[in-house]
Amino acid sequence: MVRLNKDAYRKIFDRVLADIKPSDAEAADITYRVNELTEILAGIVPKNVELRVAGSIARGTNLKGNGDVDIFLLFDKSVGREKAVRLGLEYGKKVLQSKKGHYEIKYAEHPYVRLYVDSLGMKADIVPALKIDNINEMGTTVDRTPLHTEFINSHLTSMQKDHVRLLKYLLRSYGIYGAEVKTNGFSGYLCELLIHHYGSIQDLMSSAVKFRLPMVIEPRQRNESNSKETASRFNSQFVVIDPVDPDRNVAAGVSLESLSKFVLVARKFVQKPDIKLFHGIGFSQAQARGMVKKLSDSGLDTFLLLSRVPDKSEDVIYPQLRKVNGQISKCLQQEGFSVYFSAQIISGRVGAIFMAAPKQRLVSRLLKGPTVFIPDASDAFIKKHRNALGFPIIDSEIYALEKARLQSVEDVLRSLPRSVLVHKDINLSKMRLLVNKVPKEYSVLLYSELQKKFL
């Protein structure tokens, strides 16, 4: 394990913490508002429904300015999931009978109420769940959340909770904090488990430098391995087993791209501790507006596909945009074109797919075929490409040299089949295609998304 210079990291951590840790006054204010909201709920719910504050505030790992609250309404298991959800939504909405604000119905495994309480200046998720003592009693996945809070509060010291804050801030600076599908990053609970397992952020980073895939971490046993069997069981190259639910991988939402970025950041920090690394590469409105010109100056063409999307949650639409993006990239590759990087964003009711590719114009293309030592396959390949300019042999494989049907990336994008453009809620068949142009209203969102792809 590579270890950092203690004095170097302590100074950096203390300076960053001074900026990101809630002050005593802010902590007291949050406590006051949470208590007031809890008292209102206590006057609404029956006595046999337990109120339990959860999330980063309950665990003492929240960042400055994050006053959002999760309050669980814990019903007796005998009530059952369906009734608990129905009653929980009713109780949550009733808060607004005495406080001004509005609510939204959000969805995890089942619905919950998101309250925006104007007079308290806070957002709060009111989540119905069943009260359980162990994972074997779980009816829905949200039932285990209070168990997470109990585990963290009984295993993390005050110093370690500050290190969780440092880790969250570091990950957020590089666009990889958050388990939502748009980010594919590290959840707050995963950050807490990693600090618990390694003891401190410095030991986490010095260990991350030597990560090898598959990486399997078991926080309850304080064990880690490169078990291919465990990775296969969870269908993931990065596994962090939930200490309260051994059948759950807390890191399931972390993409290899996000994990790789964290490893590289940790490596740079270990090699040369620098507070600037904690703040990422920064954000600039001016750079966002000049993004296309900068890419063009580097020899790239940019392509922006715009289309209307339904008024549904980003968690529903974003994965579909990502899938269509991947299918389009595959079509381009099949036609012989390279895509350097791509991204997708949602702005209101508009979905956008962005691609950057080297300036390319193909007159011919070389298609790879099978080995000549498989007669049926190679004969079929030659028959299929009977109009080819020729069939060069490279090693034992046969290729077809053909005149390019589509000579540019733009040609391919304007000729995409409906099977690629249409996917569930996404329909790009009437898309608007912009070449080397990004309207101002999309530039900031797109720039922010592209930043996640660079270190």
Image: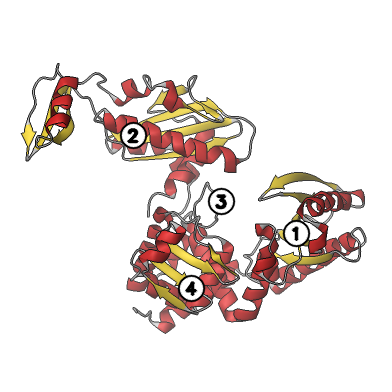
Q: Give me the C-alpha separation between circle 4 and circle 1.
A: 26 Å
Which residue in the protein does label 4 denote? 218
Q: Do the residues labelled 4 and 3 touch (CB within 8 Å)?
A: no
Q: Amino acid under label 4? A: Glu
Label 3 residue SS: loop
- Where does label 2 land, which residue? 330
Query: For the residue labelled by badge 4, is the local secondary structure a helix, a strand or a loop?
Result: strand
Q: Which mark is residue 129?
A: 1
Which residue in the rendered view is the most extreme toward the top?
A: 387
Tell me the distance, in whole angstroms, between the alpha carbons under discs 4 and 2: 37 Å
Q: In this view, does 272 lie to the left or right of 16?
A: left
Are there few (<14), some (14-19), or many (20+) residues within 10 Å of tag 1?
many
Cα gap from disc 1 to disc 3, whole angstroms: 21 Å
Give the SS element for disc 2: helix
Q: Which mark is residue 180?
A: 3
Q: Which of marks 4 and 3 is nearer the N terminus?
A: 3
In the image, 378 versus 441, the foreground residue is 378
Label 2 or label 1, whichever comes before in sequence order = 1
